[in-house]
Image (cartoon, grey):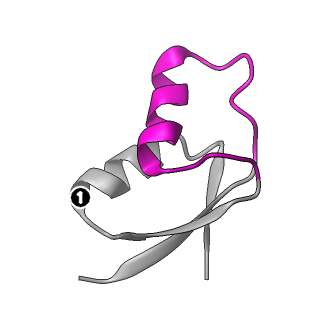
Amino acid sequence: MATIKIKQVRSTIKKPLRQKRTIKALGFKKLNQVIEKEATPQILGMIRKVNHLVEVVD
């Protein structure tokens, strides 16, 4: 499967607990961190839920 790089660009302060847990489940620990994940349907769904907090990096 293909891999994608994701970067957290916005903070989770004052965001719902569900979004905070999704960011943590993706593996983010701090702002502007870039992680690489497999492009599975589950990961893509998680990215879609917090698309206002992350961006996909080329």
54 w.r.t. 2: above or below? above
27 w.r.t. 25: above or below? below
Left or right side of 13 for 20 = left
* Callout 1 secondary element: helix
Amino acid under disc 1: Pro
47 w.r.t. 17: above or below? below
Q: Which residues are magenta?
A: 10-31
Give the quadrant of residue 53: top right
Q: Residue furthest front?
A: 29
Q: Return the residue at label 1.
A: 41
Residue at (32, 70) in percent of width and height: 39
Residue at (65, 20) in percent of width and height: 15
35 w.r.t. 30: above or below? below
Left or right side of 42 for 16 = right
Q: Position of residue 2 (x, y in %)?
A: 32, 83
Was residue 13 drawn as part of the magenta stretch in this picture?
yes
Residue at (25, 64) in percent of width and height: 40
Residue at (39, 45) in percent of width and height: 46
Q: Position of residue 16 (x, y in %)?
A: 57, 16
Q: Position of residue 48 (x, y in %)?
A: 44, 47
Q: Position of residue 52 (x, y in %)?
A: 64, 42
Q: Quadrant of the C terminus?
A: bottom right
Was residue 15 drawn as part of the magenta stretch in this picture?
yes
